[in-house]
């Protein structure tokens, strides 16, 4: 596993946290970074109009701290002038990388000519990219894309090659089309074709990386220079640590203990209190507990308890009750009937 260079920026690892809309906020990025192995983390998708208007919602999505480094700010949209303004704004505020989203398949993004809609008119998209590249003084510009809009429009290899010619310093390719959304399997052969299409810039593979073995398989089959992980990190923020270890030593570290997993949840919750407010932390964790729970079963008392919390005190009480129960369970002092209820 080699370090990754994006222009003049060298990352400690070639493992990137994806810009998952609604999930990869500052609070979660710090949790993933604390586990180790993250070379670069990306913000949520940022709307340039929101930056121009100084929308509080947009500014919260772009919020960062000294610990949240190095950071990529990802922009979406189809208006070149607005993207240029937003790119300058990101550079002025210390973004290490500015990325243009060309892969989001969500209707509310594509209907604004952003995301994977940019795959439908390559010449127009390149015109936008050239303008954005021209306004950046020193920050690398990158792009994240899909294979194409659908199977009749596989444009990623051609687009990646032309993006490189236009000055883009890295391309991330998700191995699905827009029409596939998140169904089916990511196509490794499609990622490999993008790797083969460029001359010098790194290509990052993305899609269906849930285990260290998945990571190695993608690298072996595509030749990609690094990996971007999204949904696989939501329930296992330590996946970057595991992949880094596996690719360098062949060894996957032991999974965090139940106490360590609970501490990650606590860190995440209190990060939200710190960067947002108590109400937001409570509301968000009612939803996010289901992700953590995937790696903590049996944990019925945790899932159901968090879903009805109303205050930070409720959160800490539920966490304490769950840990007490798990210690009893792990010691074999919970009878089979209780185990079935919790599972």
Image: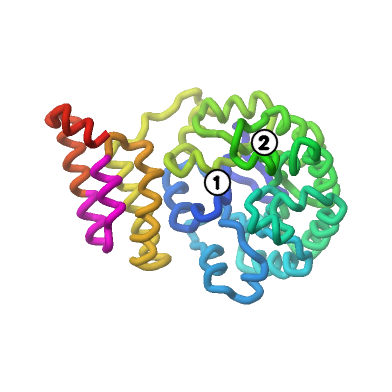
The answer to whether residue 200 is left or right of residue 86 is right
Secondary structure at badge 2 equals: loop
Q: Tell me if residue 313 is in the magenta stretch.
A: yes
Which residue is nearer to you in this view: 47 or 258? 47
Q: Residue furthest bottom?
A: 53
Q: Main secondary structure of the magenta part?
A: helix
Question: Local crowd at mark 2 within 10 Å, few (<14), some, or many (≥20)?
Answer: many
Question: Local crowd at mark 1 within 10 Å, few (<14), some, or many (≥20)?
Answer: many
Residue 249's x, y, as percent? 50, 25
Q: In the displayed structure, would residue 181 be above or below residue 272?
A: above
Question: On the rendered image, what quadrant is the N terminus found in?
Answer: top right
Numbered tag placed on residue 17 in the rendering:
1
Q: Residue furthest right?
A: 123
Q: Residue at x 37, y 43 (%)?
A: 292
The answer to whether residue 55 is left or right of residue 311 is right
Residue 116's x, y, as percent? 71, 49
Secondary structure at badge 1 equals: strand
To which quarter of the image does residue 278 belong? Answer: bottom left
Q: Tell me if residue 307 is in the magenta stretch.
A: yes
Start and end of the magenta stretch?
Answer: 300-319
Residue 154's x, y, as percent? 79, 38
Of circles 1 and 2, which is in front? Answer: 2
Q: How is the image coloured?
A: rainbow
| Disc with the residue nearer the chain's start (1 vs 2) | 1
Numbered tag placed on residue 175 in the rendering:
2
Residue 35's x, y, as percent? 42, 43
Q: Residue at x 51, y 67 (%)?
A: 60
Q: In the displayed structure, would residue 179 be above or below residue 66?
A: above
Which residue is nearer to you in this view: 50 or 181? 181
């Amino acid at each position: 596993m080699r370090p990754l260079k994006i222009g003049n920026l060298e990352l400690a690892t070639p493992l990137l946290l994806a810009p998952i809309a609604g999930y990869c906020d500052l609070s979660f990025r710090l949790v993933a970074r604390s586990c180790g192995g993250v070379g670069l983390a990306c913000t949520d998708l940022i709307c340039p109009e929101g930056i121009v208007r100084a929308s509080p919602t947009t500014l919260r999505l772009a919020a960062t701290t000294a610990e949240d480094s190095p950071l990529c700010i990802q922009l979406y949209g189809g208006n070149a002038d607005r993207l240029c303004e937003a790119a300058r704004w990101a550079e002025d505020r210390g973004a290490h990388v500015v990325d243009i989203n060309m892969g989001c398949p969500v209707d509310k993004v594509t209907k604004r000519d952003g995301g994977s809609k940019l795959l439908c008119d390559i010449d127009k998209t390149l015109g936008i990219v050239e303008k954005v590249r021209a306004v950046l003084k020193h920050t690398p510009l990158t792009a994240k894309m899909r294979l194409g809009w659908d199977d009749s429009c596989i444009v990623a290899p051609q687009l990646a090659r032309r993006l490189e010619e236009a000055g883009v310093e890295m391309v991330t390719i998700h191995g699905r089309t827009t029409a596939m959304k998140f169904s089916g399997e990511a196509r490794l052969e499609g990622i490999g074709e993008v790797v083969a299409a460029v001359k010098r810039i790194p290509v990052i593979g993305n899609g269906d990386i849930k285990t260290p073995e998945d990571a190695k398989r993608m690298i072996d089959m595509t030749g990609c220079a690094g990996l971007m992980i999204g949904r696989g990190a939501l329930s296992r923020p330590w996946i970057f640590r595991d992949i880094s270890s596996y690719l360098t030593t062949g060894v996957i570290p032991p999974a965090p203990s139940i106490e360590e997993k609970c501490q990650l949840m606590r860190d995440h919750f209190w990060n939200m209190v710190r960067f947002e407010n108590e109400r937001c932390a409570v509301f968000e964790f009612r939803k996010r507990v289901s992700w953590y729970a995937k790696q903590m079963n049996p944990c019925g008392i945790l899932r159901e308890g968090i879903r009805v919390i109303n205050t930070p005190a409720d959160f800490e009480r539920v966490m304490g009750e769950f840990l007490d129960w798990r210690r009893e369970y792990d010691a074999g002092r919970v009878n089979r009937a209780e185990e079935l209820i919790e599972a």
